[in-house]
Structures are given as structure tokens and as C-alpha cells.
Image (cartoon, rainbow, N blue to C red):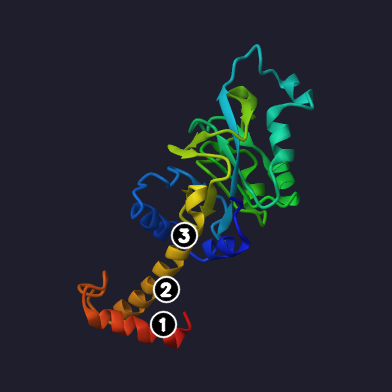
Amino acid sequence: MALSNSTRDKLKTVSTATLCSALFKRGLRNQFIQNVHPLNANLPNMVGEAFTLRYIPAREDLNPMTVFQNPNHPQRVAIEQCPPGAVMVFDSRKDARAASAGSILITRLMVRGVAGAVTDGGFRDSPDIAALPFPTYHQRPSAPTNLTLHQALDINVPIGCGDVAVFPGDVMVGDKEGVFVIPAHLADEVADDAVEMTAFEDFVTEEVIKGRPTIGLYPPTEQKSKDDFAVWRKAKGR
């Protein structure tokens, strides 16, 4: 099922922390990609369906610089095939010693209308990528070309990224903290739940700032907390 515009818009308003709680309620504990950070933390949320590229360890006799002359090289093909609105997700085996991509390929994704890019390795030209109005997430900067350690192999197959399974079509959400993976079939209900949770947490935050204790408020085990939230929600139009 394709990601609807309504669900996409909702996911742009919620945090990965809230999504972690929403998925935990549904029994999923390991959906936050480990050790992946935004190159530019000042951009809005990244939301899109996963389009994947899998790297394996490079073998020197199969991965010389000349392979880039092949128009069917998987890395180059994946960059051109990633659909507008999708998120390009690289499985770099958590190895940032060689780059998953650089600024030219990332710029190409941006120009093509892709929603963002994520790798559990590193991007080269990271200062240039960080200056783009395009959400990107990696482990750390990496100058060497991917060919030195990574061999691009499979396009749009199930992968691992930062110790999380990512299937093509899963919904990727990135914020200032990191990247979260929502199984595609849960995206609509999780988005609705996360919006509700966010409204309540905004109410709680305002109350805590005023000096209210969290016991009985968060979670709302006292009826007064529920009643106060209903009043707050009506006043805020949420």
C-alpha cells in the first residue's frame, strides 16, 4: 500500500521518539536506526518510502575504478531509479571507512525529487551535502570512494541499516535525532496514534513548565488530567 499524502503530512509533525513508543505498543522494539545522525539538523522531518541499495565487501579484482564506466553499475542505476518522494537507504554494513555516496549523487537525488538519503556508513563531501536543502543521515564523514571497501550489488531488496531491517516500501521518518523505520502496513495507524500522542505530550509539557507534578499526569492516571487535557485540546483546536 502506497504512502498516502495524509499519512506523510502527519509523520512530518511527530518525533522519532514518539514513533518509538507507538511501535513499542505494537510489539516492535528495534526500529530506530543506530548510530545515524543528520548532516543538517535544521531541516524539517524527512518522510518517504524506502528504496534500498545493498553493499557487500569489495573484492579488488571486481571493484576497480573502471567499473564506474559501466552504465549499469548498481550504485548509479539506483540513484536514477529511486522514485520521487522515496528515501534512498544504503546498507553499508555499518562501515564508514569508505563513502556510500558523495555530493554529486546526493544532489542528483535531490534534483530528482527524492525525499532524503540514509546510510549506516558515511557520505563523502559531507560539508557540501550538509549545505543542501535535502535531509541526509550518516554515521560520520568518509572521504574514500565506496569502491575501496564497498561493492554495490542489490537494488531495492530487504537490507539491514544500523541494525534495523528495512524492506522496500517501509516508511522512513527522520528528525533531528535520527531515523525511524515504520513497517509499511502499520504506517497509517501509527501516524494517527503518533499525532494523538504528540498532542497529549504538548499538553503535559505545558503543565510541567507551570510546575505540575508528572504523577497522575503522565500517564494520565487521574481523571482530572484527562479532563484538563480535553479542555486544553478544545482551546488549542487539536
How many tags in the picture? 3
State the image quarter where residue 125 is shown: top right
Q: Earlier in the sequence, mark 1 or mark 3?
A: 3
* Of 210 and 226, the residue lying toward us: 226
- Please, is residue 181 above or below residue 207 in the view? above
Q: Residue at x 43, y 88 (%)?
A: 235
Q: Rounded to the nearest whole Å, what is the CA distance between mark 2 and mark 3?
A: 16 Å
- Please, is residue 65 above or below residue 113 in the view? above
Q: Are marks 2 and 1 in contact (CB under 8 Å)?
A: yes
Q: Secondary structure at mark 2?
A: helix
Residue carrying label 3: 189
Report whether 19 appears left or right of 62: left
**Any part of residue 45 in sight:** yes
Q: Earlier in the sequence, mark 2 or mark 3?
A: 3
* Of 105 and 219, the residue lying toward us: 219
Q: Rounded to the nearest whole Å, what is the CA distance between mark 2 and mark 1?
A: 8 Å
Report whether 232 appears left or right of 215: right
Q: Are marks 1 and 3 in contact (CB under 8 Å)?
A: no
**Disc 1 vs disc 3: which is toward the camera?**
3
Percent x, y of residue 104 = 73, 41
* Residue 60 disc label: none
Q: Residue at x 60, y 15 (%)?
A: 59
Q: Amino acid at mark 1?
A: Arg
**Disc 2 vs disc 3: which is toward the camera?**
3
Q: Residue at x 75, y 25 (%)?
A: 68
* Residue 233 disc label: 1
Percent x, y of residue 195 = 46, 67
Q: Secondary structure at mark 3?
A: helix
Q: Earlier in the sequence, mark 2 or mark 1?
A: 2
Q: Amino acid at mark 3?
A: Glu
Q: Amino acid at mark 2?
A: Ala
Residue carrying label 2: 199
